[in-house]
Amino acid sequence: GEVEYYIRGTVSVGGHVFERYGIKTHFIGVGEDYIALMKKYILPFIQEGDIVSTSEKVISMCQANVVRMEDMKLSRAAKFMSRFGKKTDSGIGITEPYKLQLMIDMNGMGRVLYAGIAGAVGKLMGKRGVFYEILGENTAGIDGFYSHSAFEAYHTLATLNPKEPDKVCDEIYENCHIPMM
């Protein structure tokens, strides 16, 4: 079959030029088999020396490492506190009450309040990102609850960081002989 690329080009890193190809797939649903996806979309086209990079969110969808809005209980505190967040170019962040509620569920109210206060103080002092530094990469990795997304699934679904990403890469290599990152 013919592979369909949606990104094609080169990038130069440290004096080395790399070719990049983004391979178009169907919309990956919750619980799909990432080994089967690699065999279908990547294996027929991979060549010696290639390295495959996939979105964390694709792996999280396959692992069903997601949270559905309908399974959450939105607190008054999350509704109130989300009004003080600031929408940025990188996403909706804590301005989305359900996303803030998920952060509270993952970290506890006290830690989120502390991170919020420290983040506000950090911004006053010219330092950005303190909120997510305190709450960590798993909180920073929450993606979803986007009412503006072209993909309806993301309106009421959040993906978390993948579980055991090194193990996933090893498993893909063992089953498909595809070097992954």
Image (cartoon, rainbow, N blue to C red):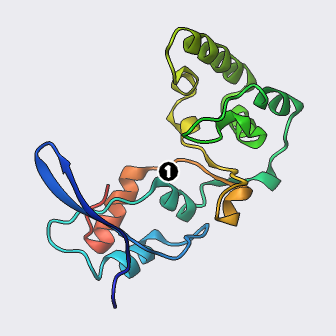
Percent x, y of residue 6? 40, 70
Residue located farthest toward the right when viewing the structure as drawn: 76
Q: In the rendered image, which quarter contains the N terminus?
A: bottom left
Q: Where is 32 relative to 130, above or below?
A: below
Residue located farthest toward the bottom when viewing the structure as drawn: 1
Q: Which secondary structure, mark 1?
A: loop
Percent x, y of residue 74? 84, 40
Classify mark 1: residues with Cα within 10 Å, few (<14), some (14-19) or many (20+): some
Q: Amino acid under label 1?
A: Lys
Q: Residue at x 70, y 50 (%)?
A: 145
Between residues 157 and 174, which one lies in front from this camera angle? 157
Badge count: 1
Q: Residue at x 69, y 55 (%)?
A: 148
Percent x, y of residue 135? 58, 27
Percent x, y of residue 164? 44, 50
Q: Where is 54 relative to 24, above or below?
A: above
Residue 109 found in image quarter: top right
Going by the image, does 1 lie left or right of 34? left
Q: In the rendered image, which quarter contains the C terminus?
A: bottom left
Going by the image, does 70 lie left or right of 141? right
Going by the image, does 152 lie left or right of 53? right
Q: Where is 44 relative to 112, above or below?
A: below
Going by the image, does 138 lie left or right of 85? left
Provide the residue designation for mark 1.
163
Between residues 148 and 44, which one lies in front from this camera angle? 148
Residue located farthest toward the left when viewing the structure as drawn: 15
